[in-house]
Amino acid sequence: MSVLAWIVLASVASGLLSIGLAALFALNVRSDKWINILISYAIGALLGAAFLNALPEALELTDTPKQLTFILLLGILVFFILEKLLLWRHCHLSECEAHEPTSQVVSTAGRGVVGVHDHGRSGMMIILGDTFHNFVDGILIATAFMADIQLGMVTAIAITAHEIPQEAGDFIILLNSGFTRAGALWSNLLSSTATVFGGLLGYFMLNQLDHLIAPILAIAAASMIYVAMSDLIPSLHKRPEIGATVQQVTLIVLGISTIWLIGLFFGHNH
């Protein structure tokens, strides 16, 4: 199968799988529990993909490792700025500080519903932010496949693992913002098509500019590290009890192990 076919297949599969499972978890009565479990696993998958695959591959492709690590550092700073601009936001629960300026929390009569009176504004922000985020994910997936098929698979799996709890959180917020279940599902599906467009752009761009593969892999590693460390890990501190901590560490290790084992398996088969 050609690299382009892998990119398109991985982009489509990542979008459909993450949104399908996210909707399933979001509609579950115990959705917050499932989302918390997925967040812990996603942290391991993202960190494993960044440190065991994307970064080593990028360092192998460059003659200037110091320049590459500077790009990694710069990438983390850029993602911080983008998140401040609400373009690269990662919300995994219905209560999200990124939406406070546009959504009102109703606390009267014991209720706590986000976005009831915002007339869908927080929902539209979610969709716009996700579309941009998915487009960038597509470029990162394409870059990984252009470097190595195994790296592409690992990157797509890590991105999908993170997208499931994020899309579940988004689904809840869209419902609270006034969307119907069908409307929220279709909005997320349309937003996910940006991954394919990002993948196609990444493929055709890097065909002509293959010297950019290593720097973009460093940016991919930066995005995965930033999301795991800045957005996901802080949410785990809300459950400081020993039992929850053991569960979280176990799931993080499981996520890292999954990436490591996939790398071993496909490494032996290529």
Image: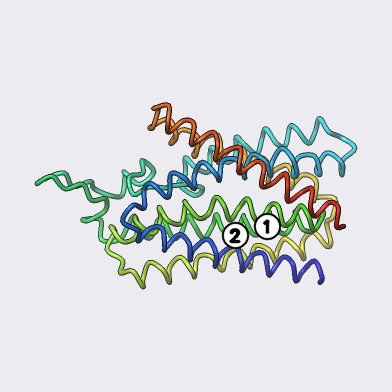
The N terminus sits in image quarter: bottom right
Residue 223 visible? The answer is: no
Q: Amino acid at mark 2?
A: Phe
Q: Tell me what residue is drawn at x 80 percent, y 55 percent.
A: 266
As helix, strand or loop, the secondary structure at mark 2 comes to helix
Q: Tell me what residue is drawn at x 76 percent, y 52 percent.
A: 151
* Quarter occupied by residue 15: bottom right
Residues at marks 2 and 1, CA–CA distance in whole angstroms: 7 Å
Q: Position of residue 139 (x, y in %)?
A: 68, 57
Query: Relative to residue 59, is residue 26 drawn left or right?
Result: left
Q: Position of residue 99 (x, y in %)?
A: 35, 47
Q: Tell me what residue is drawn at x 49 percent, y 44 percent.
A: 39
- Around disc 1, counting alpha carbons within 10 Å, would you say few (fewer than 14), some (14 to 19), or many (20 or more)? many
Image: 220 above or below 21:
above
* Circle 2/circle 1 CB separation < 8 Å: yes
Image: 225 above or below 205:
above
Q: Residue 139, which numbered label?
A: 1
Q: Residue 105, which numbered label?
A: none
Residue 36 visible? The answer is: yes
Read off the residue under disc 2.
135
The C terminus sits in image quarter: bottom right
- Around disc 2, counting alpha carbons within 10 Å, would you say few (fewer than 14), some (14 to 19), or many (20 or more)? many
